Amino acid sequence: MSTTTIPFPDIKSPGLRKNLRLDGEGSVQVELDAALAGSLKIGNAKVFAIYGKGGIGKSTTSSNLSAAFSKMGKRVLQIGCDPKHDSTFTLTKKMLPTVIDVLESVDFHAEELRVEDFVFPGYNGVMCVEAGGPPAGTGCGGYVVGQTVKLLKEHHLLEDTDVVIFDVLGDVVCGGFAAPLQHADRALIVTANDFDSIFAMNRIVQAIGAKAKNYNVRLGGVIANRSKDTDQIDKYNDKIGLKLAAHFPDLDVIRRSRLKKSTLFEMEYSPELEAVQKEYMRLAASLWIGTEPLNAVPMKDRDIFDLLGFD
């Protein structure tokens, strides 16, 4: 199999290139050069990548999962991978500068950066980083993820971390936004109990399957969010070999927590809130113990259309 390597435009790091190669089932991915990729392996931390349809609640899920891990006494790092850089504001109570912004401020001389320039403490000691992304239409998010991990490694921040959570932008539409899968142990998919969310989940399953052929990442399960029921999710899961890892209903307290810029563990007590907090703690505990890798086989679009819905 031949590989064509083309320098990625407007990128000052020689370690990252856009390689037009088959990565899994005929996908075109953004790859780290082999020497650089080896040096950026995330130490002994358990690494999770959170995916799902845009607007499905990945940042809410990621932040509360980070908080739950921290309440277990784990040292947690959350990395937001969205140009909107809104992944961590419920943990930090502010919008953080992005890695790409701070790199640009020093003309991409990474050696001039201090840890406090791009890593910020959040709720219960969770470390927070917003990778950001290139301006719209000008580059690829894969570069930003690679540079972020490189910086964290160079500053030895990953050596003292137990859990790393990548909160990834929307649906998988290009190899760049699949880049966190090169570092993750398990990928979790957030979905609602509706056609559009499950249709997007199927595309993510395809992307994870492609990456799993060359990297260690495996599917870890499905998180049902903003859904009273899970009948459609269960139907899809049973068909392709996925499992439900957690279920969070559509509660107003979750919406209000975002408006209050707070995790769910900081909100005023109510019985329904306590149930959600316990579900996050249960999810964190099960992920820490370790989940079985799921070998799901994605469906054809037409087959999903025929599977879901009511007779």
Image: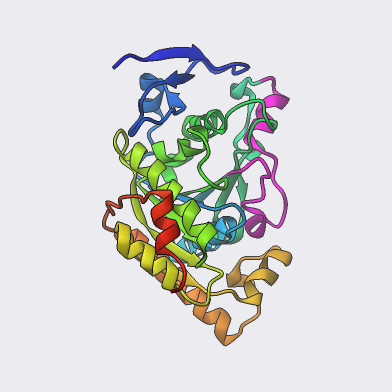
* Residue positioned 47% across, 66% down in the render: 224
- Name the quarter where the C terminus is drawn: bottom left
Q: Is residue 281 visible?
A: no
Most foreground residue, 201 or 74: 201
State the residue at coordinates (70%, 23%): 106
* Outermost residue, front side: 311
Residue 301 % position (x, y): 43, 50
Residue at the image position 60 percent from the left and 36 percent from the top = 115
Q: Which residues are magenta?
A: 81-107
In the rendered image, the vertical position of residue 199 relative to residue 231, given as above or below: above
Residue 198 relative to residue 2: left or right: right
In the image, 132 versus 18, the foreground residue is 18
Looking at the image, residue 242 lies above or below residue 49: below
Q: Is residue 248 magenta?
A: no
The vertical placement of 225 against 77, above or below, is below
Magenta-span inclusion, residue 100: yes
Q: Is residue 128 left or right of residue 179?
A: right
Which of the 4 quarters of the picture holds residue 83?
top right
